Image (cartoon, coloured by chain):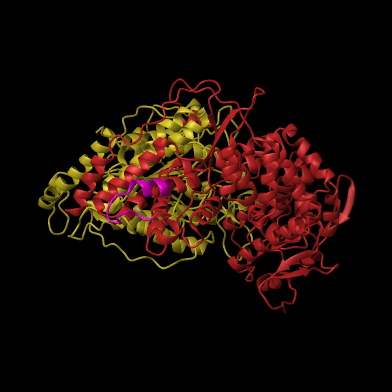
Amino acid sequence: MALDRRFLLRGLFQGSAAMMALPLLDCFLDGNGQALAATGKAIPTRFGTFFWGCGLTKVLYLPKSTGAGYEDMPQMASLKPYKAKYNLLSGFRAFVDNKANYQHWSGNAAISTGNAPSSDQQFDGQTIDQTIADVIGHGTRFKSVEIACSGNKRESYSSLGGANINPPETSPTGLYTRLFGPGFQDPSKGDWKPDPQVMLQQSVLSVVADDRKQLMQSVGASDRARLDQYFTSVRELENTMAVELQRPELLAQVTIPGMPEGMTVNKSVPVLKKTTPVFARLLAIGLATNQAHVFNMALTEPANTMFMPGDSHVFHQATHEEAVDETLGYQPVTSKFSTYSMECFAELIKALDEIKEGDGTLLDHSLVLAYTDTSFAKLHAVDGIPMILAGSASGRLKTGLHVAGGSSTVTRVGLTAQIAMGLPVDHWGTGSNLTNKPITEIMV
Amino acid sequence: MRARALIATVLLGLGGLVQADAAVNSDSAPRITGLRRLSESEYRNSIADIFGRDIEVQGRFEPDRRVGGLLAASSAILSITPAGLESYTKMADSIAAQIVDSKHRAGLVACTPKAGTAPDDACATQVISQYGLALYRRPLTQDELKGRVKLAGTIAASSGDFYTGLRYALGSMLAAPKFLFRVETAVPDGNGDWTLDGYGRAARLSFLFWDTTPDAALLDAARTGALNDPAGVAHQVDRLMGSPRLLTGMRAFYSDFLELDSFSGITKDASIYPKYSDLVADAAKEETLRTMIELTLNQKGDLRDLLITRKTYINRVLASIYDVPYNFDGEWVPYEFAQDSGRSGVLTQVTFLAMFSHPGRSSPTKRGVAFNDIFMCQPTPAPPADVNFDIVNDTHNPTLRTVRQRLLAHATSPVCASCHTHNDPIGLSLENFDSIGGYRTTENGVAIDASSALQGKSFVGAVGLGQALHDNPRFPACFARKMYAYGVGANAQEVPAKLTRETVDAFAKGGYRVPVLLKALAGSPQFFAAPPPQPAPATKTALNVAIN
């Protein structure tokens, strides 16, 4: 009988690996699961992004001094408790070269892919989280987890390229179910057994994957790329199942919460301030229990329609329609929305920092790139887009610094993040966004 | 132990199951020229039609996006992401498990295995062939069939249950690209062009007319070659149009055409509009669809009357928004707005007015842009990047107190004027309607001026607007173009006019009746035309290059 070698190897290897892993892990873990560092097994470093639309208010967020000990700024007040754990990056520019400045899109896409987009709402290449997940995302159930805090299923800025987005979770219950619903294995439970259903699903996927060759033979180039994406998804799912067949590792002292209550999810500021911490907390526990090493959280869309009840202007509208107050030097209503956005980001950082891991916190073992689409949204400006790198990537980056980019390309931030995450890269981006200069000021 | 024995047997049994078809492509060999991801409704309707309405479909569908004014067009450019496949696979397994469960088995599994505790290849072959034809919308190849029968047998043997084996074999088809995508295969038409094969034609007709997978009669017509012949197509079109299921198909198209999905992305400020809720949004969508179905299909009326009709349907929550008494029995009732109500046509329904407004106030520009995009196929380019809108916002401006005054002040700048003169007259004439579609006569204490002008013609309010637009031939031409794009999965903005010219002419000659349009469209050779095959790349194409 001819054997399907790919299937056999995968199945047998995973089956035996799962069986062998049990006693090994049992000896290394102590009763509290705290012995990870002692086993010599490194705590994984996670990568995530946090996206919000319409930027910040220069007068209120940008410190005059750079380096350590820069002055506190009012728009960043919510992040003050974590000031020593993040870097503020200002003055970096997204070059659009000879392409259009697609409003609210070019800056976003250039930061996340390294390429100025050649069409609106499409990514010229995969986003940085996926590039990093290709390297660090494979020992986990999910290659990455996406969250749309405002509940809109189209608000994800993670992509394998083109028009497709990695679909986001749009409610706390949805996120909970994905992370801790069927397929989740509680590492704190002692009676773990591989689930035969998963093995059977593997055999199903194996048959599905066999369609590949026949389909690829008779398809044109653009559809071939889409089929490639489908079969890449098959491989990712095979990986997820392989992980589900392994005994889960206890990475941190966390309790798996119960299913959250159903919550209203929309773009009203009070609602966002209520839901974002719930999303963040669930995500943090998911990261701590190894469900994923990579995540993307989008607070809103780029042309941010967050609004305050009673005020008829949404954020985006306010950026364009509100006058700059000559006395204050900024747009008073607009700036509040930027502040709210940072308050929501602070909730994510707080949730990561609350989970203790080894001798630090989950935040210490993470790198979170927070970014936006514009610097001055009123003019759709893409020079000086504010960004934040939070967490030290397990000590690979210095933190607590403000670095001014001097109009160098935004891709320096992405390149730095990839190097910090251990990717073997020395350059990133295309056109004027091509760079081989990581931000050495923050590198250890 | 049982689990391990099971997996070992599965592993050993599956080896070498599927030999890929090793056909060498000649220049005229059938080629895949289209790959369209099923929409959520296409998926749900397909499952209901193949397995019955009581099979539950629970899961998350990948988001689509609007391309050239239609979500349907994105089906031809989007693929399936890892998270998406995870969900599709779970749905596939859940559906397959229901098919073989004790509740549905007798009705859905057409044969009884010799022994329920062992493989039965003959019975598995029968069931897998039957559902394979329905799910893939064409008969399975020998390799596809053998692979699934083998999977079913292997799992049946190891689990000691025929139905468990069948479940996973069915699940493998439900998760397969050949189900999740409508794979369109083309053949040379004998005149140097390419055209869809019979099964591709069957699917195109079925998804346009009924929003679902081809039924047995269509698949049979594909098998016998009847669909390669205009008379055979006409026969099927008559049958499809004679069915009440046409309403399902047209509801799907109208929803896409009118962008009714936009409701899912909007929020209204509850402190300004306490009457608004998700119930209102759902009811408004239903109102508009009922209006369209009644006018275009039940009454076989002139499509253009959509812009002037005062006839609609309301329920209790809409009666509250429209501020009309609700003293009817039953959930929905036909309603005709009074002549002096200011309401006239679909542009004055809650859908259009609320979808294209801000959370807390109306937006003449949004409404104008949406109208030109949806009804006229004239999308508005993005505004200049550095435009200053300060004046529009200043609601405390002592001299510019209404939206109209502020907007006009802003739109006098030459760079802004080109688009605003195009869009604003439409929106300004709808200023009597607030952000959720309620009627109003003043704003900030000043009477609303809803006068406007288009192409030199002056008019007042929504009634005047509807009349001004009614005779503009762009609307029905745009509608026909979008129906073509919807049917074939193309970007409506990129559809060459010559492809729809004859159809549009027939539509006009037929008094702009939608059934006439449907017949003309499906009867035109362009509806089944396929692009010539793209040359296969010499090496694997990088995703980001290929997608552009």
Count every numbered label the image shows and give the total: 0
Q: Residue furthest right?
A: B457
Nearest to the observer: residue B13 or residue B516: B13
Residue under the image location 56 percent in, 39 percent down: B223
Nearest to the observer: residue B31 or residue B272: B31
- On-image quarter of the C terminus of chain B: top right
On the picture, is A397 further left or further right than A405?
Answer: left
Residue A198 in the image: above or below residue B324: above
Chain identifier matching the yellow colour in the rendered picture:
A
Q: Position of residue B402 (x, y in %)?
A: 76, 59
Nearest to the observer: residue B264 or residue B521: B521
Residue under the image location 70 percent in, 37 percent down: B230
Q: Which residues are magenta?
A: B112-128
Would residue A40 be counted in the magenta stretch?
no
Chain identifier matching the red colour in the rendered picture:
B
Residue A247 appears in the picture as rendered: no
Q: Residue furthest front?
A: B114
Q: Position of residue A61 (x, y in %)?
A: 48, 49
Residue B541 appears in the picture as rendered: yes
Would residue B122 be counted in the magenta stretch?
yes
Q: Residue furthest left?
A: A27
Quadrant for residue B281, please give it.
Answer: bottom right
Nearest to the observer: residue B509 or residue B468: B509
Q: Position of residue B231 (x, y in %)?
A: 71, 39
Q: Position of residue B362 (x, y in %)?
A: 70, 59
